[in-house]
Image (cartoon, rainbow, N blue to C red):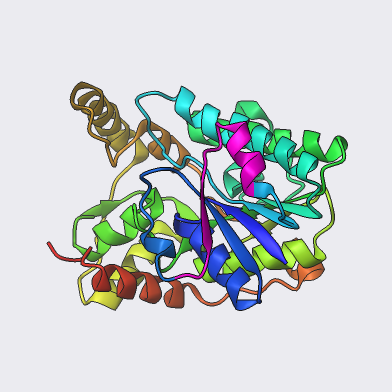
Amino acid sequence: MRALVTGATGFVGAAVARALLAEGWQVRALVRGGSDRRNIAALAVEPVVGDLTDPASLERALEGCEAAFHVAADYRLWAPRPQELYRANVEGTGFLLDAARRAGVTRVVYTSSVATVGLPADGHPGAEDTPVSLADMIGHYKRSKFLAEQRAREAVAAGVPVVIVNPSTPIGPGDVKPTPTGRIVLDAALGRTPAYVDTGLNIVHVDDVAAGHLLAFHRGRIGERYILGGEDMTLRQILTLIAQLVGRSPPRIRLPHGAVLPVAYVSELYARLTGKPTRVTVEGVRMARKRMFFSSAKAARELGYRSRPPSEAFADALRWFREQGYLQG
């Protein structure tokens, strides 16, 4: 069987491509012209040049494919032109699903995010059915992913066989950019995180997320969403674990969110003036006011999904960053 993977040159997409190859699939990778192909250089995939915003290229890429794994997304917590996130994440998803319908693929696995999942007011982990609305989405990235997931549900209503997966915070090898979460790991490992705020994330190994994609293809119910997560950890626990793995002392200073927000505003202003991206974003600080804790019970129950301890995810990520020269400095 042949599957198209969008975003295969990226972090999660490359992991999905590896998992498909290991299962004996033929893999076609949608790549943009001039994109960084390091993640697929050693993989026996068929690169096809195209773009989510070019419907004709998506139709060509899907020819002869029985399945599509739509992993590609513009994952930035700050962008000088926010419309780019909506163009790629919302319109691009619509174009891909329309092309999949015309191509007659047997199933599409759409990669959403826990950013679109609600968080209970009592602090319990979020689940697939936790009430949430567009008004709850903080920032353009979360809003664009929320709207993209709506497009996926509309496609299901139109007869497209879509299963939605919502990864939490993937960590592991192959984070070439790196992503905002990968940057947290790098900065902590390099001793560039002297303080922390009271927040939390659900940490999962990227290869477990990839395995969850295949489980969703084989066992997922059309129109359903499945959280692919791991273990809930506070930011302090995360930074302490990374410090232990690299032999550093963990940060001990806890900052109130209100003290970090002005820094984020200044950082974004500087980024707009210079054109250089910033690591401290207003959206990120606002999101950090809530602990992003989630439950993968539904995926475990219906798909047979499992995840390994976060320590393995961080160890594999740090090993890969070290091998690629990211930890010099």
In this view, the residue in front, 55 or 127, is 55
Residue 59: say if magenta: yes
Which residue is drawn at the image coordinates 54% and 28% (left, top)? 86
In this view, the residue in front, 131 or 42, is 42
Give the x, y percent position of residue 38. Answer: 36, 61
Q: Is residue 165 visible to the viewer in this orientation of the structure? A: yes
In this view, the residue in front, 310 or 324, is 324
Which residue is drawn at the image coordinates 65% and 76% (left, top)? 24
The image quarter containing residue 28 is: bottom right
Tell whether 84 sits left or right of 127.
left
Q: Is residue 207 above or below residue 184?
A: below
Tell whether 255 sits left or right of 169.
left
Residue at the limit of the structure toward the left, as seen here: 329
Q: Is residue 31 above or below residue 146?
A: below
Please tell me how many numbered marks the rendered image carries.
0
Q: Is residue 136 above or below residue 114?
A: above
The quarter of the picture where the C terminus appears is: bottom left
Q: Which residues are magenta?
A: 43-61
Give the x, y percent position of residue 160. Answer: 82, 43
Give the x, y percent position of residue 213. Answer: 66, 62
The quarter of the picture where the N terminus appears is: bottom right
The image quarter containing residue 328 is: bottom left
Which residue is drawn at the image coordinates 68% and 63% (left, top)? 2
Give the x, y percent position of residue 249. Answer: 20, 70
Q: Is residue 230 visible to the viewer in this orientation of the structure? A: no
Tell whether 243 sits left or right of 214.
left
Residue 145: say if magenta: no
The image quarter containing residue 182 is: bottom left
